[in-house]
Image (cartoon, grey):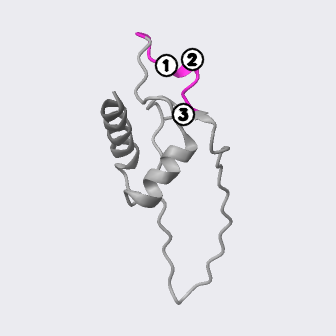
Amino acid sequence: ALTNGKYRSCLHRAVVNRDSERKSLAFFLNPNKDNIVRAPEELVLKDGRRVYPDFTWAAFLGFTQHNYRADMNTLDEFCSWLLNQGQQQK
């Protein structure tokens, strides 16, 4: 969503085995829950269309924690859910 679909995130899966030691260092970026997640103007398509709607990190986090297990379709499923929620509030 931050790149307006230009770059895709990979699904993280760790693989371990009993033959070799594994060390990893994880970094996570979690904005404040009330921050709006929105692609910068430089990454919006030439026609001005945004691929994903604006949303708060709290909405996304709540969706992944209560409604949907994270996978490669999470962002698309979240956006469909988010847009449907907006339609229900009208």
Residue 24 image point, x, y percent: 65, 69
Q: Is residue 6 above or below residue 32?
A: above
Q: Are the residues flagged by discs 3 and 2 in contact, CB closer than 8 Å?
A: no
Q: Amino acid at mark 3?
A: Leu
N-terminal-most mark, 3 or 2? 3
Q: Disc 2, disc 1: CB below 8 Å?
A: yes
Is residue 1 shown above or below 19?
Answer: above
Q: Amino acid at mark 1?
A: Val
Indicate whether residue 46 is drawn in magenta.
yes
**Which dot marks residue 20?**
none
Label 3 residue SS: loop
Identify the amino acid type marked 2: Glu
State the SS at label 2: helix
Q: Position of residue 11 (x, y in %)?
A: 44, 56
Give the tally of numbered discs: 3
Q: Which residue is mark 3?
A: 2
Q: Is residue 76 magenta?
A: no
**Viewer-side residue, 8 vs 30:** 30
Residue carrying label 1: 44
Alpha-carbon span between mark 3 and mark 2: 10 Å
User: What residue range appears in magenta?
Assistant: 37-47
Alpha carbons under labels 1 and 3: distance apart: 10 Å
* Element on which disc 1 rests: loop
Q: Nearer the viewer, residue 57 or 3?
A: 57
Point out residue 51 in the picture as x, y percentages from the top left corner. 40, 27
Tell me if I can see residue 13 in this picture: yes
